[in-house]
């Protein structure tokens, strides 16, 4: 296993050989070129490495080389080294997009640390591109990113609900993406050009229900009327968020509209026809609420034509990395920035934190990460977890990361982790991890 690919460009042949050997001994895969023009050959947008080049070279200096490389891929990290402490040159190069500028003599520790950061940044760029390409190809919504068994099931179910137009009930903790899934289904359906109307059931006031949700006829002119939120969703999709918060009277009123396909706006002399497609979200088991007499059984059965449980992030940890990369890329793009490389501390936080706020918390973490703000204590201290429990959790995360990186190839994952075969499989069994889940 190597730390990553370095393309080294140095016109001094003895120095090129020495630098190449030193980097190889440090664990890098090195391609060496004495001619900068040859060093440009074969580079593409998906080339996975980092460029390390001298500045003072005949034919093409490092600054010009960096400009040529930006034409191939503006996100390709280029590290320039010079024996001349030219501050103005360094500032100009960094302003023009050079990843870093080092002055000889460079200590081995400084050079290796810079290369590791640049390689981490390169991997993140390529992973984000792959993620965007896969999403564009599949039409996959950002919040349905992930290859866990649970997410594959949800994507299949979303297509079924979108095609059939069946009412559905989504169960899951706060922040797992119930409304996001409903919006995705709406976007996939034939009703996508009609409104998606989200109603926060906990905010419905019984006193304002008729005017706000059924609408009103009359006012300052003979033809004046206001559409209620339910009527606005006609021929579109009505999402009832937190349906468990509805009181008995409002449950009955909404059930009547769903069953009859009609509503009576305030002041109307006749009913208005509505074509409703309803998806409801809840944090609790509505079936148990029905059994306890706290929720109407007839409304429950009207809503639960298809019931889906959305798992929390802690139950699909293999999806956290791709989701974080999506949120970080989106946050950086909004601010015209590039995504900074992950530090070991940030990676540890992603690997071991339980994410009780689910997608909302992960998205906020990505936002603050891209802003360079402090995200709080990491790696996760674990609350009441012992050191042994935290180590166990982190070990499981490292095993999953290795299998994910090697697409489920156990032999390659063993090599990545430098583990003997028996030890590797013993640890998989200990943590209940199957390599086949990552293929």
Image (cartoon, rainbow, N blue to C red):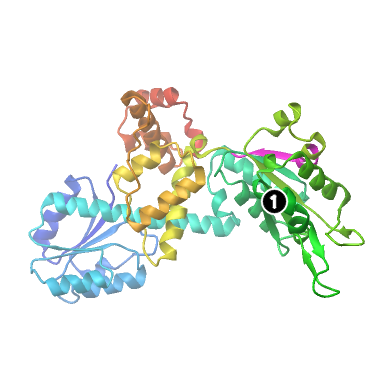
**Disc 1: CA contacts within 10 A as few (<14), some (14-19) or many (>=20):** many
Residue sitting at x 88%, y 50%: 260
- Whole-percent x and y of residue 391? 33, 28
Where 80 sits versus 220, above or below? Answer: above
The residue nearer to you, when weighing 345 against 397, is 345
Q: Quarter of the image holding residue 271?
A: bottom right
Is residue 190 shown to the viewer in this render? no
At 33% from the left edge and 24% from the top edge, which residue is drawn?
A: 388
Left-right relation of 283 to 127 = right
Instruction: Describe residue 424's horizontal placement relative to residue 320 as left or right.
Output: left
Disc 1 element: strand
150 and 423: which one is in front? 150
Residue 148 image point, x, y percent: 54, 40
Q: Give the range drawn in magenta.
A: 301-310
Residue 275 vs residue 334: left or right?
A: right
Say whether residue 69 is left or right of residue 405.
Answer: left
Relative height, residue 374 to residue 394 (above, below): below
Residue 384 image position (x, y, % from top left): 38, 26
**Is residue 433 rendered magenta in the image?**
no
Give x and y (percent) for residue 291: 75, 27
Label 1 belongs to which residue? 239
Is any atom of residue 65 visible in this view?
yes
């Amino acid at each position: 296993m190597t730390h990553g690919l370095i393309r080294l460009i140095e016109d001094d042949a003895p120095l090129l050989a020495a630098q190449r050997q030193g980097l190889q001994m440090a664990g890098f895969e090195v391609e060496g070129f004495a001619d900068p023009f040859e060093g440009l050959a074969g580079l593409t947008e998906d080339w996975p490495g980092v460029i390390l080049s001298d500045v003072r070279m005949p034919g093409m200096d490092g600054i010009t080389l960096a400009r040529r490389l930006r034409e191939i891929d503006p996100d390709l990290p280029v590290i320039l080294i010079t024996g001349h402490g030219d501050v103005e040159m360094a500032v100009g190069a960094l302003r023009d997009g050079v990843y870093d500028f080092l002055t000889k003599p460079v200590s081995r520790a400084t050079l290796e640390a810079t290369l590791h950061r640049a390689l981490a940044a390169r991997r993140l760029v390529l992973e984000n591109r792959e993620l965007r390409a896969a999403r564009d190809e599949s039409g996959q919504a950002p919040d349905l990113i992930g290859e866990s068994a649970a997410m594959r099931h949800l994507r299949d179910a979303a297509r079924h609900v979108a095609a059939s137009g069946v009412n559905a009930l989504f169960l899951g903790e706060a922040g797992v993406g119930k409304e996001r899934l409903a919006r995705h289904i709406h976007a996939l359906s034939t009703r996508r050009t009609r409104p998606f109307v989200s109603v926060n059931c906990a905010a419905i006031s019984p006193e304002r229900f008729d005017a706000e949700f059924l609408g009103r006829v009359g006012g300052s002119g003979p033809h004046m009327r206001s559409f209620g939120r339910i009527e606005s969703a006609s021929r579109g999709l009505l999402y009832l968020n937190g349906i468990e918060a509805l009181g008995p009277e409002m449950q009955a009123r909404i059930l009547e509209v769903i069953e009859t396909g009609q509503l009576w706006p305030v002041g109307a002399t006749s009913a208005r026809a509505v074509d409703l497609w309803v998806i409801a979200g809840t944090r609790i088991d509505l079936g148990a609420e029905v059994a306890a007499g706290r929720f109407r059984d007839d409304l429950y059965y009207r809503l639960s034509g298809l019931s889906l449980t959305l798992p929390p992030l802690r139950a699909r940890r293999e999806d956290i990395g791709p989701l974080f990369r999506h949120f970080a890329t989106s946050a950086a793009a909004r601010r015209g920035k590039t995504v900074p490389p992950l530090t070991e501390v940030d990676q540890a936080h992603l690997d071991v934190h339980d994410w009780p706020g689910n997608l909302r918390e992960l998205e906020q973490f990505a936002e603050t990460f891209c802003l360079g703000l402090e995200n709080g204590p990491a790696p996760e201290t674990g609350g009441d977890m012992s050191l042994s429990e935290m180590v166990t959790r982190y070990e499981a995360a490292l095993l999953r990361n290795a299998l994910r990186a090697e697409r489920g190839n156990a032999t390659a994952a063993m090599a990545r982790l430098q583990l003997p075969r028996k030890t590797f499989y013993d640890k998989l069994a200990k943590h209940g991890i199957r390599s086949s889940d990552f293929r």
